[in-house]
Amino acid sequence: RPQPQPAMPYPDLMEVAGQALARRALEIAASGNHNLILVGPPGTGKTLLASRLPGLLPPPDMQEALTCAALHSFHDSTSVEHLWRRPFRHPHHSASAAALIGGGARPRPGEASLAHGGVLFLDELPEFSRQALEMLREPLEAGAVTLSRAAHKFTYPARFQLIGAMNPCPCGYYGDPEHSCRCTSEHIQRYRHRLSGPLLDRIDLHVSMHRLPARLLLETQSKGEASATVRERVLAARQRQQARQGCTNAALSAQALATQCVLRPEARRQLEQAADALQLSGRGLHRSLRVAQTLADMEGADCIDLQHVTEALAFRQATAPA
């Protein structure tokens, strides 16, 4: 049965000028339910792009809508017009671990659970407390948050897409040809190392963004495709995944990858060589394979080809220096 469409339209991707690589990553993230991090100077459109992701996703089904409404009822009432909208949660970087994960004497769900079925957007990602970010590792893997107290244990669903955004350095202008960076290499390294390796390992797509010239921003013809056009391709890719395995590629277990992801010989060799050269962890290797499968689904291909693996690995760049 078709689900009601949200009364309030989502922000349209057509309003974002340029940034072809970031737009491509956003479509891949929507198609396979992958996590994404955007790195770039202030004003490059990181927040603008992140807010467009819910509009590329299929509407929630009845179970997702009711679960979301129940979670939000802990904090406020959910109107009917919001019932069929994908959540987009955008907590401030001063949010505590309890605010992100949940807590209290009788624990209530936090932002991770309120984003269930939708998007959790963390702007200024390195400015969040290390404790809060590390506690996100559990829901990113399990899709749920468990809060234990002396007499009770509470488990809340928290299966969301994480989008992080950050500057390349504390002042924000490292690598920007139009602004000089005031940060020392030590400051840059300390800033980027606020994000742990295990957390970054759980983010499938890493994208660097650059400032656009004013001429491109002012040209109306520089606008990209509308959300509705991209969403049609996203829905087609997701339908292929549901028909094949009953879930999105991001939700594939490590055991299912061996049977569901069919690699051509040259693609397998490339993945093996890159995993050794880049010293990918087992998790990093599996996440790259899931992204490659999403790229194949976007093209309607039955097998993962060399170009799918190459593009997936290109998005697997390290955000923090070694």
Image (cartoon, grey):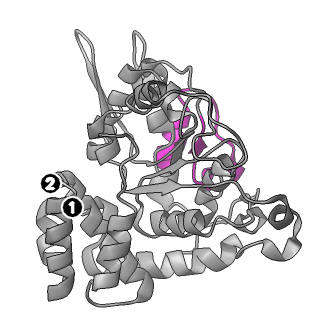
Query: Which corner quadrant of the image does residue 199 belong to?
Result: top left
Placement of the C terminus among the 4 image quadrants? top left
Residue 17 appears in the rendering: yes
Foreground of the two, 4 or 319: 319
Instruction: Tell me the amino acid under the disc marked 2.
Output: Gly
Residue drawn 82% across the image and 62% down it = 217
Residue 110 appears in the rendering: no
Question: Which residue position is annotated with label 1?
Answer: 286
Expressed as whole percent of the image width and height from the top left, the position of residue 271 reads 20, 71
Residue drawn 64% across the image and 47% down it = 176
Residue drawn 23% across the image and 11% down it = 151
Question: Which residue position is annotated with label 2?
Answer: 282
Q: Is residue 155 above or below residue 214?
A: above
Marks 2 & 1, CB-CB < 8 Å contact: yes
The disc placed on residue 174 is: none
Q: Is residue 64 above or below residue 297?
A: above
The magenta-colored residue range is 66-90
Query: Which corner quadrant of the image does residue 90 belong to?
Result: top right
180 relative position to 289: left or right = right
Instruction: Tell me the amino acid under the disc marked 1.
Output: His
Expressed as whole percent of the image width and height from the top left, the position of residue 85 reads 62, 54
Judged from the image, the secondary structure of the residue bearing numbered disc 1 is helix
43 relative position to 148: left or right = right
Q: Is residue 307 above or below residue 205?
A: below
287 relative position to 7: left or right = left
Residue drawn 57% across the image and 53% down it = 86
**Was residue 77 drawn as part of the magenta stretch in this picture?**
yes
